[in-house]
Image: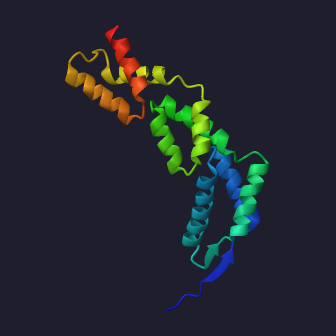
Amino acid sequence: METNVQRKEVTYAQLLQRAVWMLGQRDHGTEELREKLRLAVTRKSLRETAYQYWVAEETLESVMQWCREQGYLNDERFCQQFILQRSRRGYGPQRISQDLQRKQIPSSTAQHALRHTEVDWQQCAQDVAEKKAGRRWPTTYPEKVKLQRYLYSRGFQSEDIRAVFENISS
């Protein structure tokens, strides 16, 4: 039994409504939003078996441009908010930079945002170390190495980690 599936283009208004809704939930990077909109169209095709939905690249670009012009889509603002959010969760600048790269933020934008953020990375590393170590600070070499490896895995830089251990010994 053969089904007769019709192709149907997603309109500018439908795509714009979805984009504004997504940006109303939280900020997105440009490429992240583009991929999510494409995925939303694919999911719509899977839900409705009578039609196979698709979106023209020109329509998608028009929606992205409108969102940028209205100030809804801004990679710099997204980076700043992302950096603050991830630093509050105990991640360092290297890990955050990798996460921004995965979200396809241009490296120049990410590095600029990391340089101009108001996060005190040494204090952040200190807080993470205190939380990890608990009441008992590491005294033996293997314990110190373990804590150091943990801080590296969270994305902190060597000078921030060194400052944590200088604070421990003083």
Residue 87 shown left or right of residue 58 in the figure:
left
Residue 79 shown left or right of residue 150 in the figure:
right
Q: Taking 169 as reference, is 126 above or below it?
A: below
Residue 167 shown left or right of residue 50 in the figure:
left
Q: Taking 110 as reference, is 35 above or below it?
A: below
Choose between 51 and 154: the one closer to the eye. Answer: 154
Task: Give percent across and percent down for residue 55.
Answer: 67, 70
Q: Taking 18 as reference, is 152 above or below it?
A: above
Labels in figure, total = 0
Color style of the picture: rainbow
Residue at the extreme top of the image, as rendered: 170
Q: Taking 129 as reference, is 25 above or below it?
A: below
Choose between 8 and 102: the one closer to the eye. Answer: 102
Task: Give percent across and percent down for residue 63.
Answer: 73, 59
Q: Residue shown at 46%/37% (left/top)?
A: 94
Where residue 146 sits, quadrant-wise, is: top left
Residue at the extreme bottom of the image, as rendered: 1
Q: Residue shown at 49%/44% (left/top)?
A: 99
Choose between 109 and 103: the one closer to the eye. Answer: 109
Task: Give percent across and percent down for residue 90.
Answer: 45, 30
Mark yes or no: residue 32 visible. yes
Q: Residue shown at 52%/48% (left/top)?
A: 101
Where residue 118 sits, quadrant-wise, is: top right
Which quadrant would the C terminus be assigned to in this image? top left
Q: Residue shown at 34%/13% (left/top)?
A: 168
Mark yes or no: residue 81 visible. no
Task: Give percent across and percent down for residue 49.
Answer: 56, 77
Residue 10 shown left or right of residue 79 in the figure:
right
